Image (cartoon, helix red, strand yellow):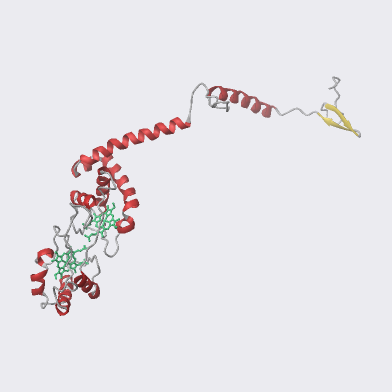
Amino acid sequence: MSTDKKIDEYSGTETTGHEWDGIEELNTPMPRWWLGIMFVSIIWSIGYVILMPAFPLLHGYSKGILGFSDRVRVSEAVSKMHADRSVQSQQLVGADFETIRADPNLMRFAMAQGKSLFGDNCETCHGARGRGFTGYPNLNDDIWLWGGSYEDIRQTITYGIRADHDETRLSSMVAYGRDEFLSSGEIDDLVQFVLSLSDPTTQNTRGAALFTQNCVSCHGAEGRGTRENGAPDLTDADWLYGGDPASVRTTLFNGREGVMPNWNERLGADQIAALSIYVHSLGGGE
Ligand code: HEC
Ligand code: HEC
């Protein structure tokens, strides 16, 4: 590089001394703001390399004097979450409903757990948010086959209904036609009688005696159902298997035995408790 400075006569700026065919290159200095940013960046990056993890090394990486690690931070957060959860899970297992309800944190925990477990395990049969299908009860109303208290629901979920477990809930709707307990004509009379129970505009007395003889032991004297037998109320407009004459006839002819699996072998007691809280809240809760 030559030392003698040459000033361009038109712009008054120093030239680099490079010249081609009479055209000379100006040596315009870098703007100060640009240089400022560059120097600050250099200082900042030196500081960063000293404090924070930066370079890959042969075995591992430069850790920096702060010893910061995202991986350690995440794993600490995860183990804290597990610890919090296991405390709350333990609380859920032993607690009765009043205790859980009185503790807003525990209640929130149970609802969140219950909701996600319900989505994973129950919606295939009970529908989205437990709205139900024919043969699979709607869990959002306050109509219960086997009882809608927290304890009843927990019992149902734990041991199931007509499931393969000694303590499961049993009893079923008898197949009056198929098993030849009643004649076809008697079944027709009973269908009309059953339909009249929920529809006060129709009167049917022919089936009444047959109903008293055959049905009240499970469905109750007035047909309002009994929970010990999981026998539905026949006087409301809510039908598990359909309330048109053909569906009711099929029910009486072939019987019904809805199966609800027992969950005690697949889920923990804490998970069942959380599910029971969630299901209880869906129906408004008894
Ligand atoms: C394989 C299908 C199936 C799955 C999966 C299932 N259920 Fe059920 N559930 C049923 C059937 C069928 C009934 C009705 C049984 C009857 O007719 O008495 C029922 C009944 C119930 C009842 C009793 C309702 C009442 O009126 O007393 C509750 C509570 C319940 N289920 C909760 C659950 C929960 C919670 C889960 C998930 C852990 C679940 N179910 C998963 C089929 C299922
Ligand atoms: C041994 C007890 C028992 C007897 C006796 C019995 N039922 Fe039932 N019934 C049930 C049960 C349990 C169910 C529910 C079945 C299920 O959930 O899968 C049911 C269901 C029904 C249903 C379906 C209701 C709906 O919501 O879809 C009708 C209708 C019915 N019974 C009518 C009768 C009539 C009529 C008689 C007498 C001829 C009778 N039952 C006798 C236990 C009984």
Which residue is drawn at the image coordinates 17% and 58% (left, top)?
170
| Image quadrant assignment for residue 145 | bottom left
| Image quadrant assignment for residue 2 | top right
Residue situated in front as seen by the camera: 169 or 48:
169
Which residue is drawn at the image coordinates 59% and 26% (left, top)?
45
Residue at the far right: name it. Answer: 21
Residue at the far bottom: name it. Answer: 185
Residue situated in front as seen by the camera: 76 or 106:
76
Q: Is residue 227 above or below residue 109?
A: below
Which residue is drawn at the image coordinates 35% and 51% (left, top)?
120
Q: Quadrant of the N terminus?
A: top right
Report how many numbered discs are placed on residues in the image. Answer: 0
Residue 3 in the image, given as x and y percentages of width and height: 84, 19
Residue at the far top: name it. Answer: 3
Residue 234 in the image, given as x and y percentages of width and height: 17, 67
Residue 124 in the image, given as x and y percentages of width and height: 33, 57
- Asked whether, in this view, residue 37 is left or right of residue 193, the answer is right
| Image quadrant assignment for residue 140 | bottom left
Q: Is residue 185 above or below residue 84?
A: below
Quadrant position of ligand 2: bottom left
Residue 278 in the image, given as x and y percentages of width and height: 27, 49
- Asked whether, in this view, residue 212 is left or right of residue 28, the answer is left
Q: Is residue 145 above or below residue 252?
A: above
